[in-house]
């Protein structure tokens, strides 16, 4: 029988949650790397037992881990992330220029075709690639040439947090950076273009239509329609139908269009999920009710999903990497909160149940659908 | 070149990472300094590269401290000789995660 493995990164370690295809009974394994900040864990689509993990600490810096047995055992791999050449400067919080400095790995994206290739999105924002299973890392420096001097850190740092690989075109990659915006390469990462037309940041940028500088929080794609992307921006939920050439707002009737994660149903390319948060200064759900919102129309029309989620006195946040979908039928959805709960739905969001309630603050949730 | 067996005490997170005991014994070439100890430590435990000092600049990470002989030596030159008791292997060189937080 098929099953799922949910990889949870928290502020104090990693946890692996497993269930069979019914997704009713769960086992919880962890903490792995107890006490470390686990920003992201993700398995290879080619070899699901190969999992990469970003392990970081304000004290001891960045280390990287890899498992080749589904998370039972781990081995450290390479942790040297050197920018190519003189990395120069970017804009700092006070408007001055600030040297580019490596801080941590926010995002890992294993190749869709090669278990030894994996991308890493880092802070200060850059994209690195390993072709030897994580032992060595090389920057794709063309990205920072796209007006990198105008990029600026968001409240969480200047991080490259989103990497979306096009399943139909190995040379096409989308990335997103806070606060620089979204970018696309069509030549495997050598050259990049900003894809921010249609984004408006009236209260964040002096020029609301600027080429770069937008605070994109997350981007999601359905593999059957790689030209259609959905974006949760700082404010606004956006959609493009032409691989980022132009975006349009699809926030519709959401109670707030501020939020962090966005996800697309595994089998329905027009079914999209977001978690509205009250505002950029109040990072908790509106009205103390944790509601995942679902659109079955590719945006604009949204319905709240509440059954099994706390509907009073709930003031947690759901961070940008803390929502994921599995590929089972019905599609499963998983949401991790800063309060340490991981909620799961095994019916596309109609009903929810907590898998665990008291983990450390959840930074990321990924799910692997196992044969 | 003479080698001295020196003791180094690691904080919990680095012990976990290195899969080591609390105190590790290292053969360090004279003169025994912060730099020669850390070179030997990283050679014996490659997974610790970058966790105590920056891989490129070799500068101590901001929230790491070095104690020895009841002194905070974090701001001393990495090439300054360490106290004799440490250099003779009688007392450990302490790698510490700095106090931070409430």
Image: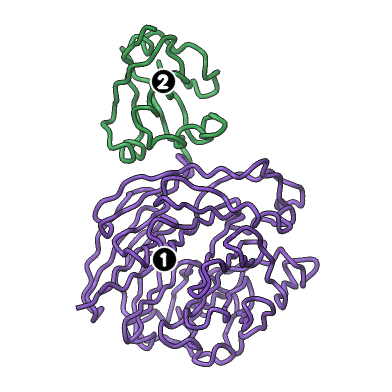
Q: Left or right: where does residue A142 sit relative to residue A69?
A: right
- Where's the N terminus of chain A, which quadrant? bottom left
Q: Position of residue A225 (x, y in %)?
A: 52, 83
Query: Residue beneath label 1, please?
Result: A113
Name the residue nearer the viewer: A152 or B44.
Answer: B44
> Which colour denotes chain A?
purple
Q: Position of residue A210 (x, y in %)?
A: 77, 68
Q: Is residue B40 above or below residue A92?
A: above
Identify the residue shown where x is 34% and y is 58%.
Answer: A51
How packed mark 1 is, by other alpha carbons closer than 10 Å (few <14, some 14-19, many 20 or more), is: few
Please tell me whether mark 2 or mark 1 is closer to you in this view.
1
Confirm or deny contact between disc 2 and disc 1 (CB under 8 A): no
The residue depicted at 58 percent of the width and 80 percent of the height is A227
Q: Residue at x 67, y 83 (%)?
A: A248
In the rendered structure, the residue with mark 2 lies on which chain? Answer: B
Hey, which quadrant is residue A238 in on the image? bottom right
Q: CA distance from mark 2 to mark 1?
A: 43 Å
Dot label at residue B37: 2
The color chain B is rendered in: green
Callout 2: SS: helix
Q: Chain of mark 1?
A: A
Residue A246, position as x, y percentages in the image: 69, 79
Quarter the C terminus of chain A occupies: bottom left
Q: Are marks 2 and 1 on the same chain?
A: no
Q: Secondary structure at mark 1?
A: loop
Q: Is A33 on the left-hand or right-hand side of A111? A: left
Q: Residue at x 66, y 66 (%)?
A: A181
* Mark 2 residue crowding within 10 angstroms, few (<14) / some (14–19) / many (20+): many
């Amino acid at each position: 029988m098929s099953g799922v493995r949910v990889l949870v990164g928290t502020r104090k370690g990693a946890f692996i949650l497993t269930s069979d295809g019914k997704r009713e009974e769960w086992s919880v394994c962890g903490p792995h790397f107890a006490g470390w900040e686990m920003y992201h864990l993700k398995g290879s689509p080619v070899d699901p037992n190969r999992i990469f993990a970003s392990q970081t600490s304000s004290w001891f810096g960045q280390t990287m881990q890899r498992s080749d047995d589904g998370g039972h055992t781990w081995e450290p791999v390479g942790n040297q992330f050197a920018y190519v050449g003189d990395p120069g400067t970017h804009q700092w919080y006070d408007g001055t220029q600030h040297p580019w400095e490596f801080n941590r790995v926010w995002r890992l994206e294993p190749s869709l075709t090669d278990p030894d290739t994996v991308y890493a999105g880092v802070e200060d924002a850059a994209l690195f690639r390993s072709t030897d299973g994580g032992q060595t890392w090389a920057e794709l420096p063309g990205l920072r040439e796209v007006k990198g001097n105008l990029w600026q850190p968001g409240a969480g740092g200047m991080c490259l947090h989103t990497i979306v690989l096009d399943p139909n075109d190995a040379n096409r990659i989308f990335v997103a950076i806070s606060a620089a915006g979204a970018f696309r390469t069509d030549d495997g990462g050598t050259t990049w273009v900003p894809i921010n037309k249609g984004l408006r940041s009236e209260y964040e940028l002096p020029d609301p239509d600027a080429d770069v500088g937008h605070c994109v929080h997350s981007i999601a794609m359905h593999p059957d329609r790689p030209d259609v992307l959905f974006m949760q921006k700082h404010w606004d939920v956006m959609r493009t139908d032409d691989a980022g050439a132009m975006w349009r707002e699809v926030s519709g009737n959401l109670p707030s269009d501020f939020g962090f994660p966005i996800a697309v149903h595994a089998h329905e390319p027009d079914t999209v999920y977001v978690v509205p948060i009250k505002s950029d200064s109040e990072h908790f759900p509106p009205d103390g009710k944790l509601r995942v919102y679902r659109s079955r129309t590719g945006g604009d029309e949204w319905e709240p999903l509440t059954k099994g989620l706390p509907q009073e006195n709930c003031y947690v946040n759901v961070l940008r990497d803390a929502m994921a979908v599995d590929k089972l039928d019905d599609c499963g959805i998983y949401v991790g909160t800063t309060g340490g709960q991981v909620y799961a739905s095994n019916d596309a969001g109609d009903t929810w149940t907590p898998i665990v309630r008291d983990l450390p603050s959840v930074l990321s949730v990924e799910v692997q659908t196992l044969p | 070149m003479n080698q001295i067996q020196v003791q180094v005490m690691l904080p919990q997170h680095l012990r976990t990472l290195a899969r080591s005991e609390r105190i590790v014994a290292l053969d360090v070439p004279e003169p025994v300094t912060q730099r020669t100890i850390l070179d030997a430590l990283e050679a014996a435990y490659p997974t610790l590269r970058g966790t105590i000092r920056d891989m490129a600049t070799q500068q101590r990470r901001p929230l790491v401290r070095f104690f020895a002989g009841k002194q905070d030596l974090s701001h001393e030159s990495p090439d300054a000789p360490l106290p004799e008791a440490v250099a003779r292997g009688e007392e450990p060189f302490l790698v510490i995660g700095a106090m931070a937080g409430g």
